[in-house]
Amino acid sequence: MKDYLNKLPKEILDLIYLARDIAAESGMRVYLVGGFVRDLILGVNNLDLDIVAETDGIAFAEKFAHALKAKLIRHRRFGTATVMHRPHLKIDFATARKEFYPAPGHLPVVESGTLKDDHFRRDFTINAMAIDITAGNFGKLMDFYGGTNDLKNKSIRILHDLSFLDDPTRILRAIRFEARYNFHIEPNTLKKMKEAIRIKMLDQVEPQRVRDDLILMLKEKRPLKEIARMKELTGFSFINPKLKVSNRVIGFLKALEKEIVWFEKSQPLRRQIDSWLIYFLGIIDDCSLNVSQEICRKFVFKKGEEKRIIAYKRIGKNFVLRLSKKGLKPSFIFSMLEPISYEVILALKAKHKNSELQKHISDFFEIYNGMKICVSGEDLHGLGLKPGPHYQKIFAAVLNAKLNGAVKNREQELDLIIQKLKEKR
Ligand code: ATP
């Protein structure tokens, strides 16, 4: 494993050496675990270090954060902690633990344990390997359950037959890893998964946990494969009992994906979109406003997420008709689209194939949105206007004129303001 480690970027390797030195000082056994080890073996980039310490992961995390002068974020509910180092490096810490599930789908009762116990509670063998980073053993791969073999055979395998009953969110995780790495869910795992699906185990889990794994799934690079696999295996009744994703909706999801790709390629400077939310709009496309509200309540989406979902559902035929007309003024198009989120606009573009609407939305992103005026508050002050809310009105009028091509530069903007002021007198 040492060879694998040596291929890592220096900034990651330095963090691992730091962990090794702190482990030596504190006399703890410390391991790299989880997805980091899986991806290291696969040769996939992964900047999320996951560290497990035998005896006391939190005490270890405190020492680590102190040495790095970094902030430690504790997750008391789970007995874990995270250090963010620079904006892009995340290091998670936990104590090696044993888990018991008091009831299927509930959160486990946890007590500290050995590394082997810790691996037995994990989802799949490919995620249950560790690299020892304790001095003396540094770089040794710990693989109690055949993870390396399963990686070689591209197999997703649970560690024991009750795994999906203990934690049904693993059903969604299996679909996610299968699609991401182009692996297959091995026959016994698939059988146990289907049994858990048949008895509706996903309905037994706290909805927020299902939501989190669903979002992770929709955040995968191009999640249509995952969605198709959900349609085949789980269906969508775990989102809402009435929800079915028809072939028409699958077609819509493809159109959504096309728009996401278009946006990412053509609008690199705009804010990053929540593409998962756009796919979610696709999945619930057949749901009424009421059912969508029910889903939002059940999954307790964040305010801004719920707002966008409901805004999309509320857009009526009239709005679409108005935006589909020929010869609209740019300022009118801007006034219609500017209050709406990018996610909702892209979903509209995917849904309504009217060529005028398509063009208006493209123009909005490519020309109108982000257009800036040159005049400032100082200019208005210079013209003898006292500051107040009317400044915003004047700026809006100048922007509208600029959008419509009536003014093109600072001089013309100032002329327009002067002319308007004269008209007012
Ligand atoms: P990703 O590459 O998507 O981040 P990951 O494997 O790193 O995948 P995390 O969700 O960060 O996934 O979890 C880290 C590790 O914790 C996993 O590799 C796995 O060992 C374990 N784990 C996560 N969720 C579960 C679960 N529901 N049941 C059992 N073990 C889990």
Image (cartoon, rainbow, N blue to C red):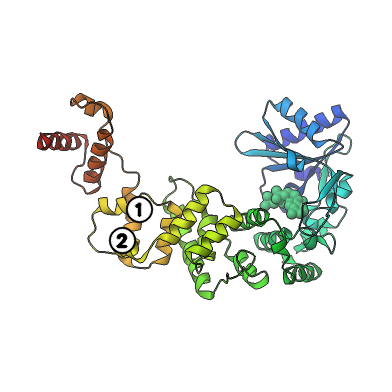
- Label number found at residue 231: none
**On screen, 251 above or below 111?**
below
Sequence-wise, the earlier of marks 2 and 1 is: 2
The residue depicted at 64 percent of the width and 69 percent of the height is 229
Horizontal and vertical percent position of residue 337? 35, 53
Front residue (pair 36, 318): 318
Horizontal and vertical percent position of residue 189? 79, 67
For the residues marked 2 and 1, what is the alpha-carbon distance in whole angstroms?
9 Å
Q: Crowding at label 2, few (<14), some or many (≥20) Cα neighbours within 10 Å?
A: many
Front residue (pair 175, 395): 395
**On screen, 81 above or below 338?**
above
- Label number found at residue 337: 1
Task: Identify the image quadrant of residue 4.
Answer: top right
Horizontal and vertical percent position of residue 298? 60, 57
The residue depicted at 52 percent of the width and 55 percent of the height is 275
Disc 2 vs disc 1: Cβ atoms closer than 8 Å? yes
**On screen, 79 above or below 201?**
above
The residue depicted at 36 percent of the width and 51 percent of the height is 365
> Which residue is under mark 2?
323
Q: How many marks?
A: 2
Q: Is residue 364 left or right of residue 194?
A: left
Residue 39 visible within the image: no
- Type of amino acid under label 2: Leu
Front residue (pair 287, 54): 287
Horizontal and vertical percent position of residue 237? 63, 68
Q: Is residue 31 left or right of residue 357?
A: right
Residue 344 visible within the image: yes
- Type of amino acid under label 1: Leu
Q: For mark 1, give the secondary structure.
A: helix
Image quadrant where one finds the C terminus: top left
Give the residue at the far bottom of this rendering. Answer: 247
